Amino acid sequence: MIENIINGSGALFTLDTILFMLLGVFLGIIFGAIPGLGVMLAIVIFLPMTFGVNPIAGILMLLGIYCGGTYGGSISAILINTPGTPSSAATLLDGFPLSQQGKSKKALLMALYASVIAGVISAMLLLVAAPQLAKITMFFGPAEYFMLAVFGLSIIASVSGDNVFRGLIAGCLGVFISTIGMDTASGVFRFTFGNINLAGGITLVPALIGLFAFSEILAKINDKDNSVSGKQMAFTGEGLKGSELTRSMGTIFRSSIVGTIIGIIPGTGGGIASFISHDMAKRKSKNPENYGKGELDGVAAAEAGNNGVTGATLIPLLTLGIPGDGAAAVLLGAFMLNGLLPGTSLFTEHATTIYAVMVGLIVVNIIMLLQGRLLINFFAKIANVPVTILIPFLILTCTAGAFAETTSVFSVYIAVVFGIFAYFLIKLGFSPVPLLLGIILGPIAESNLGRALIISEGSLAIFVTRPISAAFILLTLLSIFLAVHAARKDKKLKKS
């Protein structure tokens, strides 16, 4: 491992990689700070920029966007009482009251330091744990990979919002879309309707841009109220004192651990981690009555919790190919587009690349600290920019991105069709994330199902007689049961 870390570090510190990391963090903070944009939209829009560049630089730019955006959401939460990202919802509970007291600079700096410390801890856990967990996949055959894909699809139930069954329907629809094109086993063309452009199937980048970028742009265009929801508080007050940061270090470390643990569990995400961390800090505090009224510890807990997820969520993604949330699902697509397939081979055949990425995630958080300190005045002003001003830029970027991968206008058509389709799906209460998971995991499930049945000569017993495969069956059933149970419980609470 030490040798791989040294080799990865050598490949990491090149001029182009450093520049891409700087750019990624900068863009992430901006998109995170503007309510209505967010991390996932930023990753999708700038994904085409990684084509043709060093995979290490490209992936780290996207991870820079991911980490920067997660922190950036706290800026608008603190200054205008509107979280820039869902994971920053808990930050506004104490962040905005601090701004009302004229302590916005203190709150923003606490959010920055907590985010960076938690991000570094999470990245270090990824560096240590991921290679060890990946060794399990050495024992995987076609049956295990098929059931792993099915288990990944069952995570759809956890990321489907209020309606689990709509999520499962969207996931199945994604699997269906993944079958379009030529079947590699039989050579038969499926659902192409005689269009040669569909022979290779639906390419991932135009689908991503349509599902998450064009659909969001359409929603913003049709939104009658695109104004910022609240008046921005002045960026004033003294900076954070060393004694105040020291006093909150215990809360930051506890919340970082909570965030990393939650991040490892697929289907959770930063939002859950931030609220749990905030609640835990409140219960452990000597002055719990101060929480919700402008408590620095509350800001530290929420930001450490949601940023603790950033590295940990990559552990199941890189080792098993299971994304923890919507942004991780998009990152999974980015890894696959660069030929980096999750599992043991990722840590053996692409050891230098993946170790450079994991070490780079630590560097990304350090860059976030530097940019946060140097550009905090600029980022504070960004939070109040109306989304409508950015729509023409977003449309142009998305169109260029869809065209870039295949240099075909047909890819732009695909992106537009998926955008319109996703827009109406969202209107009907469906989430596009399960659809994306179905598109990504569908081919994995299909190809390994065929191989497993060839090995077993058509017997389905292979899936229950192999211990790891049987374990994934149980995990799949448990995942669906827990998601359904949680959805019913939420429904009862809302009625009451």
Image (spheres, grey):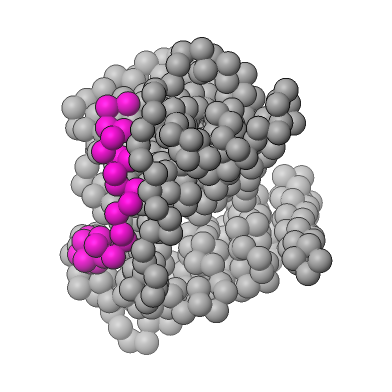
Decide whether the magenta segment is chiefly helix, strand or loop.
helix
| The image quarter in which residue 154 lies | bottom right
Q: Is residue 454 left or right of residue 115?
A: right
Q: Is residue 287 visible?
A: yes
Q: Is residue 335 above or below residue 159?
A: above
Q: Residue at x 36, y 26 (%)?
A: 369
Residue 52 at x, y = what percent? 21, 47
> For this rendering, which residue is in front, 287 or 155?
287
> For this rendering, which residue is in front, 53 or 379?
379
Residue 427 at x, y = what percent? 50, 77
Q: Residue at x 75, y 65 (%)?
A: 494
Q: Residue at x 55, y 64 (%)?
A: 434
Q: Is residue 126 left or right of residue 457?
A: left
Q: Is residue 347 visible?
A: no
Q: Which residues are magenta?
A: 373-399
Residue 356 at x, y = what percent? 36, 27
Residue 454 at x, y = what percent? 61, 61
> For this rendering, which residue is in front, 90 or 317?
90
The C terminus - image quarter: bottom right
Q: Is residue 430 above or below residue 194?
A: above
Q: Residue at x 44, y 73 (%)?
A: 422
- Is residue 393 highlighted in magenta? yes
- Is residue 188 highlighted in magenta? no
